[in-house]
Amino acid sequence: MTDRPAVDRLTCVLCPVGCELEVARTAAGGVAVAGNRCDKGVSFAEEEVLRPKRNLATSVPAKGTAARMVSVRLSAPVPREMIFPVLAEIGKLRPEAPVRRGQVLIADVLGTGADVLATRTVRGQT
């Protein structure tokens, strides 16, 4: 057995370079990052290892329209552990047409600070 800290390997996605990062947790609770060509890689690695967040997009059934579905997305990323609870909450949605692109369908979903937004306009049946 070795005393070397575990190393995570990540590809930074914050710019087109796509640096291959090696990230090790420090004794102080932070991270040590190697392989980055700019400071963006350090902040990316810190968030991805210590406080990972994700954004999501999906579709929900709509009432009162021939389109049948409304595409939705979050206004901001949420903590990774909240993805499935947020998806379950979104799954309860059945918005009534008309729905406007950008319309908030759920404000501050599950206290995450992110809103669920419609990403397209769906007209009602006429």
Image (cartoon, grey):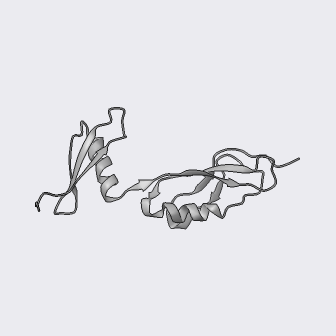
51 in relation to 110, above or below: above
Using the rendered image of the protein, determine whether residue 89 is visible from the camera's viewpoint: yes
- Most extreme residue toward the top is 16
13 in relation to 24, above or below: above
Query: Which quadrant would residue 3 be assigned to in this image?
Result: bottom left
Q: Nearer the viewer, residue 13 or 121?
A: 13
Q: Is residue 95 left or right of residue 22?
A: right
Residue at (22, 58) in percent of width and height: 30
Q: Nearer the viewer, residue 95 or 6?
A: 6
Residue 9 location in percent, x, y? 27, 47
- Count of numbered circles on the image: 0
Query: Which quadrant would residue 110 be assigned to in this image?
Result: bottom right
Residue 106 location in percent, x, y? 62, 61
Q: Is residue 88 left or right of residue 63?
A: left
Residue at (18, 59) in percent of width and height: 26
- Most extreme residue toward the right is 126
Using the rendered image of the protein, determine whether residue 108 is visible from the camera's viewpoint: no
Where the N terminus falls, by quadrant? bottom left
Q: Is residue 101 left or right of residue 68?
A: left
- Most extreme residue toward the front is 1
Residue 47 location in percent, x, y? 33, 53
Query: Which quadrant would residue 115 be assigned to in this image?
Result: bottom right
Q: Nearer the viewer, residue 83 or 78?
A: 83
Residue at (43, 60) in percent of width and height: 79
Residue at (60, 65) in percent of width and height: 89
